[in-house]
Image (cartoon, rainbow, N blue to C red):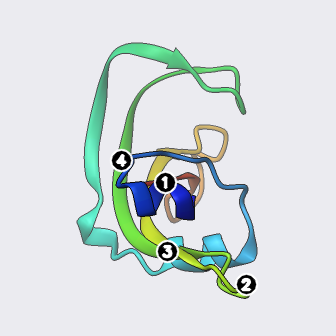
Amino acid sequence: MNACLKAGVLFSVVLAKSPAVAAEIAEIPEDTWAPVTYPGAVLDPDTSQLISDAEVDEIEYTAFASTKKPVTARLVVRRVRDKVKTEELFLIWRHHPVPDQ
């Protein structure tokens, strides 16, 4: 990734969910999420249900922070409502982090 940054190349990578990523996602203010409606429904890999809407936002994230070459980029997050838990008092969201540079 550092080579891409040095060369000015735009790139995307997918992050695994981790406590550090979850902590950054939790810092995103609730009122900044933007709704997205897909033109066609897509299959949710976790629930096998069709979904046609989501919300997205971004936050700055530093990957590899404990190494000699940390990489800071924007972390784009998509969240979808957990349709399995519809009776909850508060909305339950599933987050999908996707860093983008």
Which quadrant holds the N terminus? bottom right
Secondary structure beneath dot 1 equals helix
Going by the numbered disc 1, the residue's amino acid type is Cys
x%, y% of residue 59? 38, 71
Mark closest to the chain's N terminus, 1 or 4: 1
Secondary structure beneath dot 4 equals strand
Label 3 or label 2, whichever lies nearer to me, is 2
Vertical placement of residue 100 versus 54, above or below: below
The extreme top residue here reads: 40
Q: Which residue is mark 4?
A: 55
Q: Which residue is mark 3?
A: 61
Which residue sits at x=45%, y=81%?
Answer: 27
| Label 3 – label 4 distance at C-alpha | 19 Å
| Label 3 – label 2 distance at C-alpha | 14 Å
| Label 1 – label 4 distance at C-alpha | 28 Å
Going by the numbered disc 3, the residue's amino acid type is Tyr
- What mark, if any, has residue 4 been given in the picture? 1
- What mark, if any, has residue 67 been given in the picture? 2
Label 1 or label 4, whichever lies nearer to me, is 1
Label 4 or label 2, whichever lies nearer to me, is 2
Mark closest to the chain's N terminus, 2 or 1: 1
Mark closest to the chain's N terminus, 1 or 3: 1
Mark closest to the chain's N terminus, 3 or 4: 4
| Label 2 – label 1 distance at C-alpha | 17 Å
Identify the image quadrant of residue 31. Answer: bottom left
Going by the numbered disc 2, the residue's amino acid type is Thr
